[in-house]
Amino acid sequence: MNLRRAQFALAILGGLLSTGCASYRMGADSLYAPDIRTVYVPMIESESFRRDLGERLTEAVVNEIESKTPYKVVSSPGADAVLSVRLLGDVRRTLVEDAFDQTRAAEDRLHAEVTFVNHRRQGFAVPGPQYFDVPGTLTPAGQTALQVPAVGQTVASSQQLAIERLAQQIVGSMEESW
C-alpha cells in the first residue's frame, strides 16, 4: 500500500513539474527569441574608406553571436532570422597632441545601422500593394575606442577594440524586449 502511494505521489509530482516548467526559460536563453535557431549574417557593407572594416566587423559579429547567444550562424538567407548591418562610417579624432604635433591620445568612432528580421514572426503575404513605415528594428549603433600611443597602442589595436565593442552592441540589440 505504501509503495503504491509513493508511486502515485511521484507520478503526480512528475506531471506537475513537466507542465509547470515547460514554458519557463532561464539563463541567457531567456534573453533571446525561442523560435529562432539559425541566423544569417550577410557580409557587412562598409561606407568607410578604410580597408577591411566590413569584413572585420562581420567576423566579430559572427563570433559574438556564436559565443553569446543560443543561435547558430548559417550561410543561407533562408535562416530563421537575418541580421543586416551597414557600417555608415568611421571617424578618427586626435584628442591630445604634444608640442611637436604628435598624437598622444586619439579616438576611433564607428557608426552602423542594424536591422534584425525574425522570419518566423512575419505574417503571410497579402495580395495587393502594401505600405510600411521604416521598420522598428532599424537601430543605430556606435562605439568608440581610445588610443594612447605612449602605452603601446596602435591604430589597428584601437580600431579592433572599437570593432569588438560595436559587435557586442549589435548582438545585444538582438535581445528580446521585456
Image: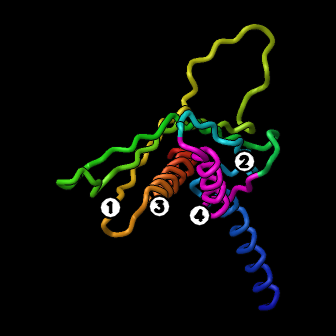
The segment highlighted magenta reads: 50-73
| Residue type indicated by callout 2 | Val
Task: Give the CA separation, mark 1 to mark 3.
Answer: 10 Å
Q: Which mark is residue 87?
A: none
Q: Identify the element where label 4 is drawn.
A: loop
Q: Tell me which label, 4 or 1, sits earlier in the chain.
A: 4
Q: Compared with residue 48, is residue 159 higher up or lower down, i.e. above or below?
A: below
Left or right: where does residue 147 sit relative to residue 132? left
Label 3: how many Cα within 10 Å (few below 14, some 14–19, many 20+): some
**Which callout, 4 or 3, points to the residue nearer the camera?**
3
Residue 14 position within the rendered picture, expressed as x and y whole percent measured from the top left: 74, 73
Dot 2, crowdedness within 10 Å: few (<14), some or many (≥20)? Answer: many
Residue 40 occupies quadrant? top right
Residue under label 3: 157
Q: Nearer the viewer, residue 13 or 56?
A: 56
Question: Mark 1: few, some, or many residues within 10 Å (few <14, many ≥20)?
Answer: some
Q: Amino acid at mark 4?
A: Met
Q: Is 128 situated above or below 155?
A: above
Q: Nearer the viewer, mark 4 or mark 1?
A: 1
Q: Which residue is mark 2?
A: 39
Q: Mark 4 = which residue?
A: 26
- The image position of residue 57, as x and y in percent, is 59, 49
Q: Secondary structure at mark 2?
A: strand
Between the residue at mark 4 and the residue at mark 3, the CA separation in whole angstroms equals 36 Å
